[in-house]
Structures are given as C-alpha cells and as structure tokens.
Image (spheres, rainbow, N blue to C red):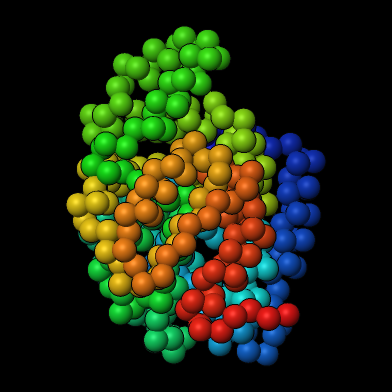
Amino acid sequence: MLGVIATASATVLAAPAVGLLGYRQLKRTTNAERLRSTTPNGIDESGFVRIGGIDQWISIRGEDRDNPVILEILGGPGASNLVFIPRTRAWERHFTIVRWDMRGAGFTFAATGPAGQGEMSLDRLHDDALEVTEHVRNRLGAAKVLLVANSFGTVLGLRLARNHPELYSAYVGTDQNVVAGGRERSAYHALVARLRQADKKKQLAAVLAMGADKSAWSVEQQSQYNKLVLTTDPLSYDTMKTVVIRSLWFSPLHTLRGLRAYLKAMNFSESLAHEAVSIDEWAEGTTFRLPFFVFQGDGDVLTPPEPARRLFDDVTAPVKDFALIRNASHFASFRHPDQFLDLMLTKVRPTVTGTPITG
C-alpha cells in the first residue's frame, strides 16, 4: 500500500507549487472548521499516553460522551486514520471515536522516529491495544468499547475480539484481511488475470516470478504487489487519488513535515505485514463470544469480499451480519462514510445498545 501512496504523492510532497500550497492551506482551514465541536457533552482531546513503555498518540472525539465508544484499529501497517477525520465527521454524532496512532504509525512514530518505537511485533501491538482499551474504558467510563478494524488492522482486531470478549461490545471488520495460512490467493490470481488482459508483460513477469506464496516474498515484493493490485484496478486507483491522497494532503492535523513522517512510518512498519503472512484465521479460531460484523467493499481487489464472506460464514457468534458497501474498493468505509455509518446505525449500534435508532 505504501508504494502506491508514495507514487501518487511523491511529486506533490517534494516540490509543490506556490498556488497548490495556497489551495492546500485553504482546504485545511475549511476542514479544521468542520472538526470544531461545541456540544455540551462532547469530547475532543488528543495527546500522548504511556502505552507499552513508550508515548503513543490517542485522539478521542465525539459529540456526546454517552454514545457508544469506538476503538479503531488502523491499517497499513503504519497508516494513521487521523487523516480521515474530516471525511468521517458525521460518525461523531452517534459514536465517540478513539483513533490510536500505534507504535510505528502517525504521531507516535513522528515524535521519536525509528529508535523510539521499541519492539515491533504483532504480539506487542496486541498488548498495546489492551492497554489502550483499558485507558479508554477508564477515561470514558465505558464498560466495553466497540472494536472497529480496517485493512491490516483486522489481523490484530480478530485476535482482540476472539481473546477478549469481556472488553469489547462487538467486532466490526472492514477491508477485512483473510490470510488463511497462505491458502487464500484469489487476489493474486485476479491480479495475474488483469495484467494478462492489459498485456502488461513486464509487470506480469515480475508477479509470476514472485509466485503466489506470500511467505516467500521479501518486504519489498509485498510492497510491489500491493502497488500493482491497487494501480491496475480503476476503482482502487481512483480511491487512492481522491480519498487517500486528498485526505493526506488536506489534513488539518498534518504539516508537510508531518506528511513525510506519515510515509516514513509506513515504510518502517512494513515488516509487520510480512510477519502476518503465516496467520491462519481458522486455526486461531472461528468462535467469537461477541457480535461479529463484516462490511466489505463490493469491488475490493486487495482484500476481496469472497474470502471475507467465507470466513464470516464459518464464524460462530451470538449475532453476526455481513454487508457489501456499494461501488467501493479497499478503503470502503472512507470512500463511502455515509454507507458505512448507515450500516453502523442499522446493524451495529442497536446490537450493542439494545436500542434501535429512531428519527
């Protein structure tokens, strides 16, 4: 994923024209105004919290502290969700949203760089997430929080939901990863088919040389693969340009230096994706003792909906539901935040609160 972000944004970040900088500042100011919250029972706070022995950045936003609390688990790896706050502003009317820049991501990485991140492993992130959960429960007086994971974050999210139903009111996965111990290869074969159809001989040769076994890939090959998947699919590439890059470029929270740190964080964290290739969701367990939801982009070519549906079908949970987000690639919840919010309000919120949405 880093490769396509870097490709689409490198020129802009390296030498932006004066006019573009002025337009950027105008948009950032407009977005900052959209983020202002004046509701009497609302919350808008952010800062560093000591988690896992290092200072990690946590943002908490919502218009009513009595609303259900969401803990987002970011994707990437290393891709902070803070850049999407202006796109998801409407979510804050119904949920209090906690966005955590985990070690190796966002402001946590920017503060101390590579040397200050400590151990980088999935086990360490799992333990950090539990500490963040406890911090949020204590800060907001919430008995449980709603776990919402996207993209690479779903790898960690599944483990948290499976292991700690006492902490989480439900699990929601979007851009749901299904690794299946290396057995899931549909996205790879679909990429091969697209390259053949487009007569992209050079790229096809590179992908075939890599083979379908991701456990044999280097970190660089994994990045190259993600880039090809997303740039060879028109909907995915459009999403990268109009949703991801625009969110980065016009983020009111990030300076130009901050955007460079954002990209460096993703590069630093890429090894986590390589660690995850051996995970088998079925072997780790498909029994969940909490409500389980998957909302997937109907046109996602990086984490296709079909494998996510197969995993969902095998899950046993007190309540479960699966839905497609229309005309959506990867980053489905951020491309169509309105559709995602509707699913959260009609399917998830009534389940965790016991109260249907009215009005």
Residue depicted at x 27% and y 59%: 286
Residue depicted at x 40% and y 81%: 144
Residue depicted at x 31% and y 63%: 316
Q: Name the image quarter holding the C terminus.
A: bottom right
Does residue 351 appear anywhere in the picture?
yes
Residue depicted at x 27% and y 44%: 180
Would residue 23 appear left or right of 74 to someone viewing this image?
Answer: right
Does residue 13 appear anywhere in the picture?
no
Q: Position of residue 35 (x, y in %)?
A: 69, 69
Q: Position of residue 254 (x, y in %)?
A: 59, 56
Q: Pick the residue in front: 114 or 320.
A: 320
Q: Pick the residue in front: 11 or 239.
A: 239
Q: Is residue 200 above or below residue 188?
A: above
Q: Quadrant of residue 138?
A: bottom left
Q: Quadrant of residue 284?
A: bottom left
Q: Position of residue 199 (x, y in %)?
A: 52, 10
- Name the residue furthest left: 283
Q: Pick the residue in front: 47 or 206.
A: 206
Would residue 69 appear left or right of 112 to someone viewing this image?
Answer: right
Q: Pick the residue in front: 79 or 24.
A: 79
Q: Quadrant of residue 133?
A: bottom left
Q: Position of residue 21 (x, y in %)?
A: 73, 45
Q: Is residue 116 above or below residue 243?
A: below
Q: Is residue 221 above or below residue 67?
A: above
